[in-house]
Image (spheres, grey):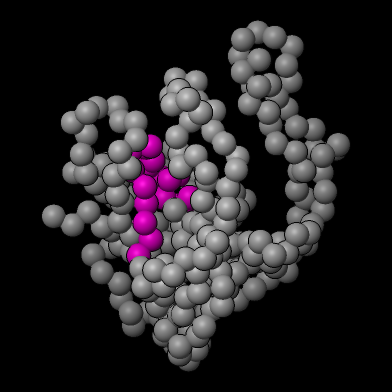
């Protein structure tokens, strides 16, 4: 039995940030596999599984928009949240008047992607020793069919939510737009594949009851081609570079 899926994803805006731009946000022309893995984790995730993106299909023309946004420079401290839960005076809030900064962004607009992916077992913490691939498959399938998630799936940045996710049997390649097909075989250059964390998703000391994870990570890159709108991620990830 195959434990893979094919989904259609649409959104008004998307931003798959290029890491080489430090101040302003500039999106890649197409999604990064790591960003799509994050989107899928918003639908269903457990330490026992990992998502693997196999193919990305770009249906709509690649169109950019320049916008200016207010962003906050700080993160809410986990210690502050736990402190307030324990009844202390800890303040977990971020005050935008003090932390706000305005940044320009070049983002994608009116995006539509086909995503083919599968999942693999990690061997990490599981709620049930008998938990297997079939159980995870059925849960993912049900959530995709019913449009369920535990946090809003987004396209690169949390302020760009997914407008529609649809589970499909196969992709209608006739829906790929003429401008995308006209690009033929396009070398997309070196792109971020995903962020690889040093702890591999295992908390310090293996303490799953009170987990603390490492922030140490490296970015993996790959060099894909988009051929008539199709990016064969499985083919190009064979030569990942750090």
Evaluate whether residue 7 shows in this view: no
User: Is 50 positioned to the left or the right of 32 in the image?
Assistant: left
> What residue is rendered at 30% in x and 56% in y?
118
Vertical placement of 136 versus 228: above or below? Answer: above
State the image coordinates of residue 222 (x, y, percent, origin top left).
50, 69
Seen from the viewer's position, the closer of residues 156 and 213 is: 213
Q: Would residue 41 be counted in the magenta stretch? A: yes
Evaluate whether residue 169 shows in this view: yes
User: Is 89 positioned to the left or the right of 8 in the image?
Assistant: right
Seen from the viewer's position, the closer of residues 118 and 214 is: 214
State the image coordinates of residue 240 (x, y, percent, origin top left).
47, 66
> What residue is rendered at 82% in x and 39% in y?
99
Question: Looking at the image, which residue sits at the far right?
Answer: 98
Q: Which residues are magenta?
A: 38-55
> What residue is rendered at 55% in x and 61% in y?
242
* Quarter of the rendering containing residue 100: top right
State the image coordinates of residue 39 (x, y, percent, origin top left).
47, 51
Vertical placement of 88 versus 148: above or below? Answer: above
> What residue is rendered at 35% in x and 65% in y?
54
Seen from the viewer's position, the closer of residues 138 and 189 is: 189
Q: Quadrant of the N terminus?
A: bottom left
Vertical placement of 133 versus 6: above or below? Answer: above
């Amino acid at each position: 039995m195959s434990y893979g899926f094919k989904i259609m994803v649409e959104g008004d805006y998307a931003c798959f940030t290029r890491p080489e731009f430090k101040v302003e946000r500039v999106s890649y022309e197409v999604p990064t596999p790591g960003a799509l893995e994050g989107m899928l984790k918003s639908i269903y995730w457990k330490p026992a599984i990992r998502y693997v993106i196999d193919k990305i299909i770009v249906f709509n023309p690649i169109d950019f928009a320049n916008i200016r946004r207010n962003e906050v420079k700080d993160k809410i401290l986990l210690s502050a949240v736990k402190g307030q839960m324990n009844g202390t005076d800890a303040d977990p809030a971020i005050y935008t008047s003090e932390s706000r900064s305005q940044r320009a962004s070049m983002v994608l607009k009116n995006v539509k992607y086909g995503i083919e992916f599968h999942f693999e077992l990690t061997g990490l913490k599981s709620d049930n020793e008998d938990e297997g691939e079939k159980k995870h498959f059925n849960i993912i399938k049900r959530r995709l069919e019913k449009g369920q998630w535990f946090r809003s799936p987004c396209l690169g940045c949390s302020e760009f939510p997914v407008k529609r996710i649809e589970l499909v049997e196969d992709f209608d390649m006739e829906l790929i737009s003429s401008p995308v097909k006209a690009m033929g075989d396009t070398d997309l250059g070196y792109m971020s594949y995903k962020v690889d964390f040093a702890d591999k998703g295992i908390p310090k000391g293996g303490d799953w009851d009170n987990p603390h994870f490492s922030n140490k990570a490296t970015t993996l890159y790959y060099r894909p081609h988009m051929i008539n709108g199709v990016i064969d991620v499985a083919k190009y990830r064979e030569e990942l570079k750090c």
